[in-house]
Image (cartoon, rainbow, N blue to C red):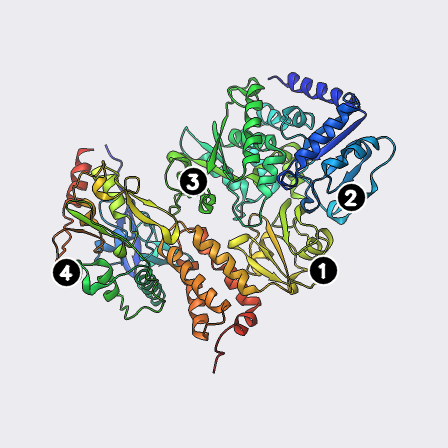
Amino acid sequence: MTPEELDEIATIERETTHQFQHRVSVCVGTGCHSAHSEEVKTALEKEVSRQGLENWCQVKGVGCRGLCASGPMVEVDTAARLYQGVTPEDAVEIVETLDTGSVPRLECPTDLPFFTRQTKIVLEHAGRIDPERIEDYIVMGGYTALLKTLTEMTPAEVIEQITTSGLRGRGGGGYPTGLKWRTVAIAAGTQKYIICNGDEGDPGAFMDRSILESDPHRILEGMAIAAYAVGADEGYVYVRAEYPLAIKRLRAAIIQAERNGLLGKNIFGTPFSFHVEIRLGAGAFVCGEETALIASIEGRRGTPRPRPPYPAEFGLWGCPTLINNVETIANIVPIVRNGGAWFAEIGTENSKGTKVFALTGRVNHTGLIEVPMGITLREIVFDIGGGIPDGRKFKAVQTGGPSGGCIPEEYLDMTVDYASLAQVGSIMGSGGMIIMDETSNMVDVARYFMEFCMTESCGKCIPCRVGTVQMHELLCRIAAGQATPHDLELLEELCDLVKQTSLCGLGQSSPNPVLSTLRYFRNEYMDQLAAKPGE
Amino acid sequence: MAPPTRVKTLKINNRDVGARQDETILEAAADVGITIPTLCQLDGLSNGGACRLCLVEVKGSSRLYPACVTRVEEGMEVLTNTERLTNYRRMILELLFAERNHICAVCVSNGHCELQTLAQDLGMTHVHFPYRHPHMVVDASHERFVIDHNRCVLCTRCVRVCDEVEGAHTWDVMGRGMDARVITDLSQPWGTSDTCTSCGKCVHVCPTGALFEKGKSVAEMLKKRQFLPYLKLMREERS
């Protein structure tokens, strides 16, 4: 592949697209997919060919548009019309009204705050390109950032841009990405690796899944840039096997990129070579922890090991390894394209850029959103999320999954960034956001997450393996109204032990849901005790 | 020729200590006679930092560090026996006693058990947590040895000695969390294992009575571990 050839692919693709009068995009992300959007797409294609309009109207599958609750979503790009809850039977009407008007009963207003309040960087192509075609990605300017990196920048300059951007890891820890890249780049060793962590396991979180399904080439390009910057020539994408659609599209994307010479040997005629392989997770949550993930790739049992040494120095097969989360990698291409300074203007002082959240629970518009750092929780829940259904009252928002905490109403006006979330006892986490209304029982919430940690503990260290079981037992007793004030004391003692002494992040953060509900909703625990203090 | 070894100076329990730069806190402490409780660690095997009993405090950090895998650093100030650490250690032991069925009175290792000794040393008088009383099996299918899962603490010494020293890798761990247990080969009766060489190393590194020799009655099972430092030394000499 030469730069001219890349241009040519884009030009041809652009001309082909312009031949059509109309373009109908059907969302084929997981949410809509499970609402039978493939059938809708087939019905539309059939209808178009029945009317002999194949050269007039193009039907294509695109990635997630975010408003998963209203799927399947269909967009008539050329008329800026958006339809929701489309069934295969609607195909006739949609095709017939292409020129003349619309189908009012299916229309979804595009001026909803859900759409207008978002800032799309990571998801800029989601819902706009066909994730299964590399041409669609290239026409959007795809792989030009890699070209720029390889031909105009030194590895040090790439790292400089990432550092300037202020990007921090999106997997949960929030470690500065530029610093991580530099550590790997200067680590001794000729063989280095890069790993993209797509083992997204938090209940209610599907950000990485959506990125992989909607824009797989973005990840490959980002990984190639990262590999060039740190001096790696082999990369792994670790995806959980529960994401078949993401795996299928990623596989297809790797083959397409290899065929076009955008991955493999001497990319763009430079000395830089880069190969990517996929590794599937076998369903263990702990494999999202970097050292466990590495063990899993190496073919060993997925258990964490104590750090240091960190993977940046001693990672995959003992070599320096860069591990970045899917969303972190997805931010690389726009940073290289627009410069680190551009990225640093978005967000707050210490948290730059945007964050993708999976909005679930008791909220009107469930789905996937991308917002700038520094937005308030109230804006997310009430403007973008459309508030609480059935006229109920907001109670809490849970962020960070089983490692995070519940944030009560009094902090709704708090800004969303790494520091403020930590201050109120939660974490940014990978981006799960579960909204709870007044009917939610907080002891139950804590019990649910503790059960999750208990069953997902790898069993290696004692505090996590046995401590979570004992904490779960105590929470069950409280929920059943059989607990004494002494049990509550014991629970708090255990929280401290497990938090302080566990080996890895899973154990250390497993008490967080209990601690944060105890902090803000202690009265609910007290109400459910069998004997009250002093009785 | 090996590069010259550097010496680091640090403080352990306010005592000045000198140690080679590749030594762990645990080794440096042992050199001056300071004992840090351990369970999964054993000289001659790799360390996983799993039991968390050897956690120590390091001045200037809010984190606790596993002494068995943390290397000494210049100027480090380590505390190994604060009240906080002793409390944590006692609770970890209590969790272990509550996890499976540890009944000293009927155990072959009674009196020679590391778990029992640790509990006595750390002043564990009773268990605050409800006992789980899980239903565990005993595998006596091997002609010479028995594994009693009731007494296993999942320290994985058997797994490591079998893999790293004997080279057979008969043992491994299966399952997650509370369901985790040590298995032979592909989770089959020990007696049917194709890889087991019946060397008995696993039995003698086991800290409790989980692995024992047939024909030993209560309190008779003495573990002999002299072979490990010996083998380790021989291998170091050869390489």
Q: Which mark is residue A390?
A: 1
Pinpoint the chain carrying mark 1: A
Pinpoint the chain carrying mark 4: B
Report how far apart the C-alphas of labels 1 and 2 lie in the structure.
Answer: 20 Å
Q: Is disc 2 in contact with disc 4, using a CB cutoff of under 8 Å?
A: no
Q: Position of B162 compared to A459: left or right?
A: left
Callout 3: SS: loop
Q: Is disc 3 in contact with disc 2, using a CB cutoff of under 8 Å?
A: no
Q: Position of B200 compared to A175: left or right?
A: left
Q: Amino acid at mark 1?
A: Asp
Q: Which residue is mark 3?
A: A311
Callout 1: SS: helix
Task: Classify 10 Å Cα crowding around label 4: few (below 14), some (14-19), many (20 and above).
Answer: some
Instruction: Give residue B144's position: percent from left, percent from top.
Output: 14, 46
Tags 1 and 3 both on a single chain:
yes
Q: Which mark lies nearer to you, 1 or 4?
A: 1
Tags 1 and 4 both on a single chain:
no
Q: Is disc 1 in contact with disc 4, using a CB cutoff of under 8 Å?
A: no
Q: Amino acid at mark 4?
A: Ala
